Amino acid sequence: MPKMKTKSGAKKRFKITATGKVLYAQSGKRHGMIKRSNSQIRDHRGTKVLFETDAYNIKRYFLPNG
């Protein structure tokens, strides 16, 4: 059997913690900041934890070796 490969796009977008949770960066911070409120800009800072069902699919299909 050939080896399972990790999807390169997912490798750049997600990180798996030591406990198995999946972290992701929130969207909406690249450009167009003048349209967004200051509270929205603050809330989208940093990373968040993905929901369990979504994290399961990411780990299973896109990051099998993670």
Image (tube, rainbow, N blue to C red):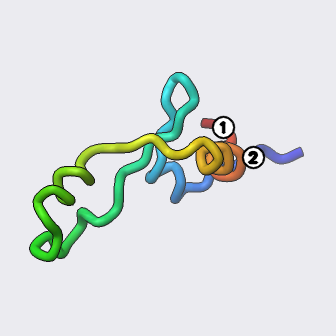
Q: Does 30 appear above or below 2?
A: below
Amino acid identity at mark 2: Met
Q: Does 51 appear above or below 26?
A: above
Secondary structure under the numbered disc 2 in the rendered image: loop
Left or right of 30 on screen, residue 8 = right
User: Closer to the N terminus: mark 1 or mark 2?
Assistant: 2
Left or right of 51 on screen, residue 42 = left
Whether residues under marks 1 and 2 lie with C-beta atoms below 8 angstroms apart, the answer is yes
Left or right of 3 on screen, residue 49 = left
Question: Alpha-carbon neighbours of circle 2 within 10 Å: few (<14), some, or many (≥20)?
Answer: few
Secondary structure under the numbered disc 1 in the rendered image: loop
Q: Quadrant of the N terminus?
A: top right
Where is mark 2, residue-wise?
Answer: 4
Q: Does 35 appear above or below 50?
A: below
Q: Nearer the viewer, residue 43 or 15?
A: 43
The Cα–Cα distance between marks 1 and 2, rounded to whole angstroms, is 8 Å
Name the residue furthest top: 18
Amino acid identity at mark 1: Asn
Q: Quadrant of the C terminus?
A: top right
Percent of width and height locating residue 2 = 83, 47
Where is mark 1, residue-wise?
Answer: 65
